[in-house]
Amino acid sequence: MDKARTEDRSSGGARGRLLVAALKLIREKGYGSTSVDALCAEAGVTKGAFFHHFKSKEVLGVEAATYWSDTTGALFANANYHTLADPLDRVLAYIDFRMELLDGPLAEVTCLVGTMVQESYRSSEAIRAACEASITGHAATLEADITAAAQQYGIADEVGAASLALHTQVVLQGAFVLAKACGDAAVARESVSHLKRYLRLLFNQVD
């Protein structure tokens, strides 16, 4: 990324404000229902400014997925669960951290890329690929701890780290869908609790 684009994102310039607006509106309304006019109004920029930075709404969607990965990646990278000595404790604490993030209005606790890909996976290959990269990239951050935990707890032959890491995201994304369907994050919290129980059973850590 060039310096000017980085500065525009970080300093609250038009490009950065449009990306922030995209994160907010797409999670609230969905990708299809979020118009360029609505994005411009939310960001406080002109339509000319929009098309100066993004050739189309699809290009914005791709950039928004990358921006989402960057901002949430920083949040997870700095989370306290990384400081725990036991790798299984780190994985379980990651799940606890995801649980904590479910507090708040539904639009603010759900996932941008999960929301966007459900609508766009057939209509936009570029957006589908960007969402896939975001979800699988985040899952990959769990693989080292899962591998270490599987070795430490003697189940390395039974657990594929990449597959299990992706499974955690399947449960989380499904929990978001259920929360939207029910209009209540409580059902999502229950699903995440079941995920934690499953991991403890898998690693033979039943109380």
Image (cartoon, rainbow, N blue to C red):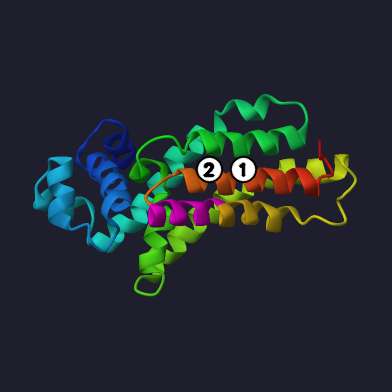
Residue depicted at x 76% and y 37%:
88
Q: Which residues are magenta?
A: 172-182
Q: Position of residue 205 (x, y in %)?
A: 82, 39
Question: In this view, which residue lies farthest toward the bottom?
Answer: 122
Pointer 2 with pointer 1, Cβ within 8 A: yes
On the image, which quarter does residue 33 sit in?
bottom left
Residue depicted at x 43% and y 51%:
179
Residue depicted at x 12% and y 54%:
37
Q: Position of residue 58 (x, y in %)?
A: 29, 63
Task: Look at the picture and state if 26 lies above or below 9.
Answer: below
Q: Nearer the viewer, residue 18 or 23?
A: 23
Q: How packed is label 1: few (under 14 Cα within 10 Å), some, or many (20 or more)?
A: some
Tell me how far mark 2 sits from mark 1, CA to CA. Answer: 6 Å
On the image, which quarter does residue 181 sit in?
bottom left
Classified by dominant secondary structure, the portion drawn in magenta counts as helix
Q: How packed is label 2: few (under 14 Cα within 10 Å), some, or many (20 or more)?
A: many
Q: Position of residue 134 (x, y in %)?
A: 49, 53
| Rendered-image quadrant of the C terminus | top right
The disc placed on residue 189 is 2
- Residue 175 magenta: yes
Residue depicted at x 44% and y 59%:
130
Residue bearing the label numbered 1:
193
Q: Position of residue 123 (x, y in %)?
A: 34, 74
Q: Nearer the viewer, residue 8 or 135?
A: 135
* Local SS, label 1: helix
Count of numbered marks: 2
| Rendered-image quadrant of the N terminus | top left
Q: Is residue 68 left or right of residue 100?
A: left
Q: Is residue 155 left or right of residue 185?
A: right
* Local SS, label 2: helix
**Kind of residue at badge 2:** Arg
